Amino acid sequence: MTLPADHIRLLFGLKLRQLRLDRKLSVSELAQQAGLSVSYVTEIEKGRKYPKADKISALANAIQVDYDTLVSLKLSRKMEPISDLLRSKFLTEVPLELFGIDPSDLLELLAEAPTKVSAMIRTFMDIAQSYNMSVERLYQTMLRSYQEMHDNYFPDIEADADRFLSEFVPAGQVVDEPLLTNLLKTRYGVHLVHFNPLTQPELAPLRSVYRPANHTLHLNAGLTGEQRVFILAREVGFQFLSLKIRPYTYSWVDADSFEQILNNYKASYFAGAVLIRRDALVAQLTDLFTRPTWSNDAFLALIRNFGATPERFFYRLSNVLPSAFGIDQLFFYRFNNTVGKTNFRLTKEMHLSRQRGPRGMVDEHYCRRWVALTILEELQMVQQQANFEGSLCRVQLSEYADSGLQYLIVSVAHPSQTGAGETGSQENMSVSMCFAMNDALRSQMAFLNPPNDTSIPFRVVNEACERCGIFDCRERVTAPTVLQKKRQFASLKQAVSQLM
């Protein structure tokens, strides 16, 4: 694998620095013996300069190694993780600038403390392997962090969406399937073909496949109208924004680079912005928030008004609420559940609150008092009793037992539109938007202020059964083993302290 020039400079500098330290030489001593200036040797060790052949020979003689050993890209064993990092795609494919990191600063950090950084990198690699973290999952985690850094609001994409609407959508006209279909065919030369998931079951999990060679977008014939419109708008986003490095399947089959993940997000954000226009959404949310009471039916009607799936609507809310209403202490999550099963899977999350909320946990049971789970249980019950095929909306005021933090949580549950689960059983999902209870929220949502709505259910909740100290909880499904171990360890520490 060919390394970039800056990585080669860094590797050479790291090796020179380590060999100098092994020989117990200071920078000034090495510079004097090699006939070079101290500042020049320092620049070499920091990976900023790569010496010419005659200077390499002088350095090799000063530290008593042969020329080939010094120029070899092989590092000592304790710095192998740094070498592995430089040879990986991470530094070349991840746009560190997005996270406010100057790549040169990172390289300088590696040069300043190579042994410590090496140990840290090895630790991260071991953690990733222990939890079987795939490259795709790492990229998705990085994307989520990027979204959270910016409150999931990107004015440049909003501006692109406005430019698209002014250019291609007549005033007063909605962005619908015929408009998008015509635009893809006539403007961008994209052919639309449908595939049948019944006759091609191996493709059933996918909503679309794009073939760049012949500009063909293959659509799953089993999609709902809302799903189909979003995928068409997303494809327009790829074309309008000229996003060449992109995934070709939706949902993911694999990801070759972080840029693919990022561009997919940009196209999806664009689609949400043109389908759920910011001004219209702000106006209707303002009306909903100023009502004295909360209405589940009114919220479901609002989602239908925009022709969106609940998940897409909640995601658009996360774009608009921080910038338009100052409501930025919020988080979003999605749970899936197989009908007839009692396990719940957290399949998507995004935290803008920087506070406690549901997070992916390994081998633990989420609190059964969360409205995101109780609404799935309720949906399953009405499906069995009345052949119900619609959506449910429920709201809950939740207070965490340990911290006292309160959240207003709006949750919508509906049959999963991706088809059946792994066993062929029906899948349901709930998507929830959670708002930290604070003055900013109360100033925008009139129904949260007395003497207005007092009918919103209130429940004390916790993170997981294994961590929960509510011992009389009727919803508990397993013992508080993590909490018990924590308390046992605290008692042990106290006993040792008293003994000492």
Image: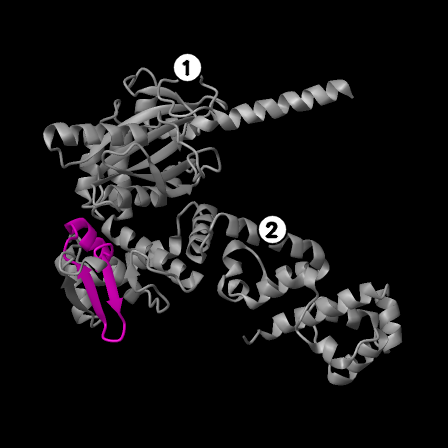
Q: Amino acid at mark 2?
A: Thr
Whether residue 332 is visible = yes
Quadrant holding the C terminus? top right
Viewer-proximal residue, 216 or 454? 216
Within the image, what quadrant is residue 56 found in?
bottom right
Q: Along the horizontal axis of the image, is 227 left or right of 491?
A: left
Residue farthest front in this picture: 423
Residue depicted at 49% across the width and 22% down the height: 402
Give me the disc on residue 123: 2
On the image, the x and y values in percent for residue 414 come to 21, 38
Residue farthest left in this picture: 386
Q: Along the horizontal axis of the image, is 155 left or right of 105?
A: left
Give me the disc on residue 200: none
Within the image, what quadrant is residue 113 found in?
bottom right
Which callout, 2 or 1, points at the residue further toward the start of the chain? 2
On the image, the x and y values in percent for residue 423 come to 24, 45
Question: Does the magenta portion include 369?
Answer: no
Give me the disc on residue 472: 1
Q: Amino acid at mark 1?
A: Asp
On the image, the x and y values in percent for residue 123 come to 60, 51
- The residue segment tinted magenta is 203-232
For the residues labelled 2 and 1, say whether their Cβ atoms are less than 8 Å apart. Answer: no
Whether residue 107 is visible = no
Question: Does the magenta portion include 222?
Answer: yes
Question: For numbered disc 1, what is the local secondary structure?
Answer: loop
Question: Where 65 falls versus 306 (above or below)?
Answer: below
On the image, the x and y values in percent for residue 184 come to 20, 66
